[in-house]
């Protein structure tokens, strides 16, 4: 059987979620905007889901906007906020290790008369609060820093960033996609104004997401239409999808504490055995402040796509930050931001565990990876054995 | 087409590469091609008898297609005369492998170039062609843009006390024995020490010190020079010039030591 250990790329939908969604495709199909029984029921269902999801992040009912997923939520947060608040200033701060969607939205805003500062990170991928503070200008209107890196798993000091932004009167957005289901979210504790969530990242269906918008924060809508979601995001609500996300949130709420322990056990076992058994191997990301499901390595003198091909032959699915596997032939910007050379980022390998992994998956990687690395190193002109054994 | 959608033949050469290794001897020529930014590196060795390629070996650091094209070309070139082998093109290699994903045609299809380099190297040894110009590296005390601006803000001209570098990403520019000793000492304070040297080796210091550096956890960047220090109010990254490939790239560091 194949071992899929790439949860950060995509997750299967939990069968319990599919069961909860199924009636809403045919039996309970109403449009919440309609003034009849079916419509009324749809409204009730929609608001029930909104309550469930709001509760999970300590938000108010009118602070939840349903979207089509994390990318749309990020667009609405950054572009919607920037356009609505450009009278206050034109400066936005993001970090170097943001998800590619944030980087590309930032580029778009730069073309539209905003200036964007990219906050550098340390060797573990963490932002520094003093450096953040030094970047703030009177023109700064928005700070966007992801809760944790989807690649190297490093967790940011979100509560401290939120507090600083609140003190300075700057809106704070956080993309929580990588951390969802692994860290309890609380918009009040963390002083968050805008927060991106995705349904698939907690084993709900694709195509649904949420943007948390704190009361008083104003956004320009990006999708104009029938005025749904308080006019911020038009379009007939995806009731089945929203029911799925809500079911996913409920399951996660019940199971997270145990699940995090289980995944951290897999993560720690894998990290220990791989670093012990494979010479010239390194852990990318923070040694302790890292997501429970993330083990990110790099191996000197070999390349990530070769590793993935070899793992595929052995029935293991993982990911890499190597340039050779990307559409742009650029290595992972996150790895480069932590201070790695391109050739080092080349040799990276990422495992992200999830709900449907078992300990056998960990054992399988521990068994097959060392000989794969050894084989590829034998082909490599960069690997000199004598430098390792002495 | 995804970058990893390879033909069965590519996968076969990736899984079972032919002619891996190196060659030595009088009738051996070798070539090396690579791309420091992308990171691929390929070494090709040929042994020539009666103007024919009698044996051929390769070593490759790179993706699946880089390994497969290297392996493929060794089979194609073996037994051919040098002039015949010089006519093998990148396209020929791709065709023989039943095609490569378009994105891989240029970046990871360097095997023909490596073979041609090896043949030219052999011919040069035999006096049939003239030596290519070898780039020399000087620039010992060359002005580095931003060096003065960031002095004390990440740039150091001396490093007697190493405690400020604890857990930092430190780059040490090779300025001879003392700078390399500092680099070695720094590995006790931080996990990330990068040494940048313009040469292919550390020729200016004794072999023992050079060996210690190579065996340490220090990351060595050979044949490179520092062009620029970049940051906002403090140093954040440096611009590196790869002298061998004449390419520039940025590297994130927290401190740079340039002994004066």
Image (cartoon, rainbow, N blue to C red):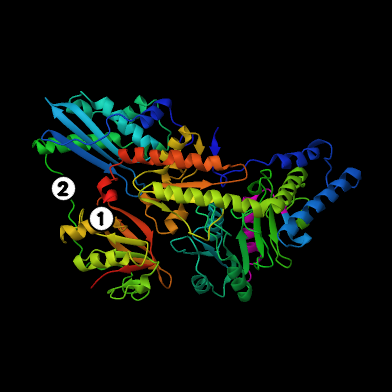
Can the viewer see residue B101 in this picture? yes
Numbered disc in front, either 1 or 2: 1
Query: Where does the image place residue A199, in percent across and percent down from the top left?
Result: 67, 48
Name the element at disc 1. Answer: helix
Q: Earlier in the sequence, mark 1 or mark 2?
A: 2
Question: Residues at marks 1 and 2, common chain?
Answer: yes
Residue depicted at 25% across the width and 51% down the height: B244
Name the element at disc 2. Answer: loop
Query: Where does the image place residue B177, in percent across and percent down from the top left?
Result: 19, 66
Where does label 1 land, which residue?
Answer: B214
Does A83 appear in magenta? yes
Tell me the quadrant of the picture where the C terminus of chain B can be found: bottom left
Query: Do the CB atoms of the residues marked 1 and 2 lie less than 8 Å apart?
Result: no
Tell me where residue A374 sits by quadrant.
Answer: top left
The numbered dot on residue B133 is 2
Residue depicted at 25% across the width and 37% down the height: B114
- How far is mark 1 from mark 2, CA to CA? 28 Å
**Which residue lies most toward the top here?**
B79
Callout 1: residue from which chain? B
The numbered dot on residue A193 is none
Query: Where does the image place residue B47, in percent across and percent down from the top left?
Result: 16, 31
């Amino acid at each position: 059987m194949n071992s899929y250990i790439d949860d950060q790329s995509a997750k299967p939908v939990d069968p319990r979620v599919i069961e909860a969604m199924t009636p809403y495709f045919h039996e309970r199909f109403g449009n919440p905007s309609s003034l009849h029984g079916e419509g009324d029921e749809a409204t009730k269902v929609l608001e029930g889901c909104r309550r469930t999801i709001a509760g999970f992040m300590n938000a108010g009912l009118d602070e939840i906007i349903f979207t089509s997923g994390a990318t749309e939520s990020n667009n609405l947060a950054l572009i919607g906020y920037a356009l609505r608040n450009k009278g206050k200033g034109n400066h936005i701060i993001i970090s170097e290790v943001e998800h590619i969607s944030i980087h590309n939205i930032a580029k778009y805003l730069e073309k539209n008369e905003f200036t964007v500062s990219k906050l550098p990170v340390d060797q573990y991928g963490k932002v520094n609060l003093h450096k953040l503070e030094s970047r703030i200008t009177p023109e700064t209107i928005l700070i966007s820093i992801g809760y944790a890196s989807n690649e190297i798993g490093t967790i940011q000091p979100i509560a401290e960033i939120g507090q600083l932004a609140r003190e300075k009167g700057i809106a704070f957005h956080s993309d929580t996609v990588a951390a969802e289901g692994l860290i309890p979210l609380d918009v009040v504790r963390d002083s968050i104004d805008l927060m991106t969530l995705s349904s698939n990242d907690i084993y709900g269906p694709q195509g649904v997401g949420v943007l948390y918008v704190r009361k008083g924060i104003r956004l320009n809508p990006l999708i104009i239409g029938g005025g749904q979601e308080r006019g911020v995001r038009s379009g007939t609500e995806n009731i089945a999808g929203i029911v799925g996300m809500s079911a996913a949130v409920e399951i996660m709420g019940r199971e997270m504490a145990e699940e995090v322990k289980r995944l951290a056990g897999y993560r720690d076992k894998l990290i220990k055995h791989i670093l012990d058994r494979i010479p010239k191997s390194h852990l990318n990301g923070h040694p302790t402040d890292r997501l429970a499901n993330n083990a990110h390595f790099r191996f000197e003198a070999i390349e990530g796509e070769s590793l993935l091909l070899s793992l595929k032959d052995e029935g293991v699915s993982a990911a890499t930050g190597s340039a050779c596997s990307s559409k742009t032939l650029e290595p992972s910007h996150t790895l480069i931001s932590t201070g790695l050379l391109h050739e080092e980022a080349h040799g990276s390998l990422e495992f992200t565990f999830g709900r449907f992994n078992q300990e056998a998956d960990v054992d399988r990687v521990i068994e097959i990876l060392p000989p794969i690395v050894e084989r590829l190193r034998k082909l490599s002109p960069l690997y000199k054995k004598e430098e390792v054994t002495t | 087409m995804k970058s990893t959608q390879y033909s069965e033949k590519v996968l076969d050469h990736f899984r079972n590469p032919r002619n891996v290794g190196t060659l030595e001897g009088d009738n051996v020529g070798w070539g090396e091609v690579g791309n420091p930014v992308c990171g691929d590196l390929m070494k090709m060795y040929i042994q020539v008898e009666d103007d024919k390629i009698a044996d051929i070996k390769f070593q490759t650091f790179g993706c699946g297609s880089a390994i497969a094209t290297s392996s493929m070309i060794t089979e194609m070139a073996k037994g051919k005369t040098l002039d015949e082998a010089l006519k093998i093109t990148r396209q020929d290699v791709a065709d023989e492998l039943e095609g490569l994903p378009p994105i891989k045609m240029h970046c990871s299809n360097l095997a023909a170039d490596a073979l041609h380099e090896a043949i030219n190297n052999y011919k040069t040894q035999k006096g049939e062609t003239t030596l290519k110009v070898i780039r020399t590296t000087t620039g010992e005390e060359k002005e580095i843009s931003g060096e003065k601006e960031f002095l004390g803000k990440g740039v150091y001209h001396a490093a007697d006390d190493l405690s400020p570098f604890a857990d930092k990403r430190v780059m040490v520019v090779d300025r001879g024995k003392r700078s390399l000793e500092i680099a070695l000492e720094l590995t006790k304070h931080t996990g990330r020490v990068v040494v940048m040297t313009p040469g292919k080796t550390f020729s200016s210091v004794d072999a023992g010190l050079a060996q210690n550096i190579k065996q340490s956890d220090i990351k060595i960047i050979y044949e490179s020079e520092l062009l620029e220090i970049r940051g906002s109010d403090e140093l954040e990254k440096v611009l590196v010039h790869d002298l061998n490939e004449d390419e520039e790239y940025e590297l994130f560091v927290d401190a740079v030591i340039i002994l004066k």
